[in-house]
Amino acid sequence: MRGPGRGGPECGALNDAATMPVKGALTVCSKIQSAEGGEYHMPNQMTADYVKPNDLAKLMVDAGEAKVCLSTRDTLIRAFMAGAILALAAVFAITIAIKTGSPLTGAILFPVGFILIYLLGFDLLTGVFMLVPLALLDRRPGVTAAQVLRNWGLVFIGNFAGAITVAFMMSFILTYGYTVNGGLIAEKVAHIGMARTLGYEEHGLPGWFTIFIRGILCNWMVSTGVAAAMLSTSAIGKIFAMWMPIMLFFYMGFEHSVVNMFLFPFALIMGGDFTFMDYLLWNEIPTALGNLVGGLLFVGLIMFITHYKPAPKRVLEL
């Protein structure tokens, strides 16, 4: 077994605790350095349920290391379940939007899938894009660029397998074994698939960068939700913190690579007039790259730089 990482416990401990801080882990009092150099205690103004940003940043780095340490089997299983649950949440939200005529209602309820994934400890590609490189930046022992890429690759495979499994299941039950038309849901998803592949292709390179930027904005929000969930040690606090940014990205129509692993294969099965290569070139690839930039650059690195490795504080002259 590897030794402890810099500033973190061994892999075994990380796998159990990195992403789920235990209530009561924070001290009730904060030590404050006095002007004379001594210490005195001041009651913490925050509740015990709140994890301070500096502690959150360390939890994020620990979580990244834990995901690298995870076995191939467990990485694939957790990724498969995450892809499947998110696919079900997507078709759930689309069904609600169609039946109620209110896309906002679908967006309000869509975060249920993300919340279940987080609370059950499953892994999405968008999450490991943000967390795993932080362990590399912190030079945790054994965490190399190759290990980061290995984790991303395994999670991608697991997410895709889970999402496409649900795509086939949903297409089967909507068509009674492909014997009848899939109805409004199938028609809606097929239209989404065409609009978000061929629709971007019509605009050429600007269209490609449009979906890339939508991918950035998506994982900026999703990763913010993941990080915000770690700010609380209670289940209800995690749920509330995660709900808002996830709802925002879905309602705004930003592009999530794992959601799209379900939507576009499902749209093809339901008769969407585009090809699998259209999906890869004009949706999945730019979306995944945008998700990587959005999660790592705008959430992971920001927390790492300003809370985990902050610059020295200014010394003010009296």
Image: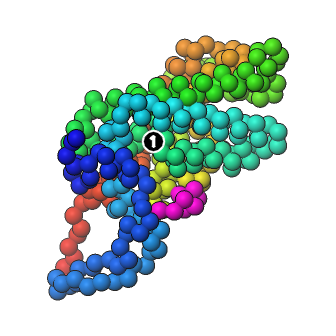
Residue at 23% from the left image edge and 48% from the top image edge: 5
Residue 128 belongs to the span the image colors magenta: no
> Where's residue 141, x and y in %?
20, 42
In terms of secondary structure, what is the magenta stretch mainly? helix
Q: Nearer the viewer, residue 275 or 131?
A: 131
Tell me the amino acid under the disc marked 1. Gly
> Where's residue 25, x and y in %?
38, 66
Residue 289 visible in the shown view: no
> Where's residue 188, x and y in %?
75, 28
What element does badge 1 sit on?
A: helix
Write the start and end of the magenta stretch as one range.
233-241
Disc 1: which residue: 127
> Is 108 above or below relative to 192?
below
Left or right: 155 in relation to 259: left
Quarter of the view holding residue 155: top left
Residue at 71% from the left image edge and 38% from the top image edge: 92
Residue at 65% from the left image edge and 39% from the top image edge: 89
> Is 89 above or below relative to 160?
below
Density class for disc 1 (Cα within 10 Å; few <14, some 14-19, many ≥20) is many
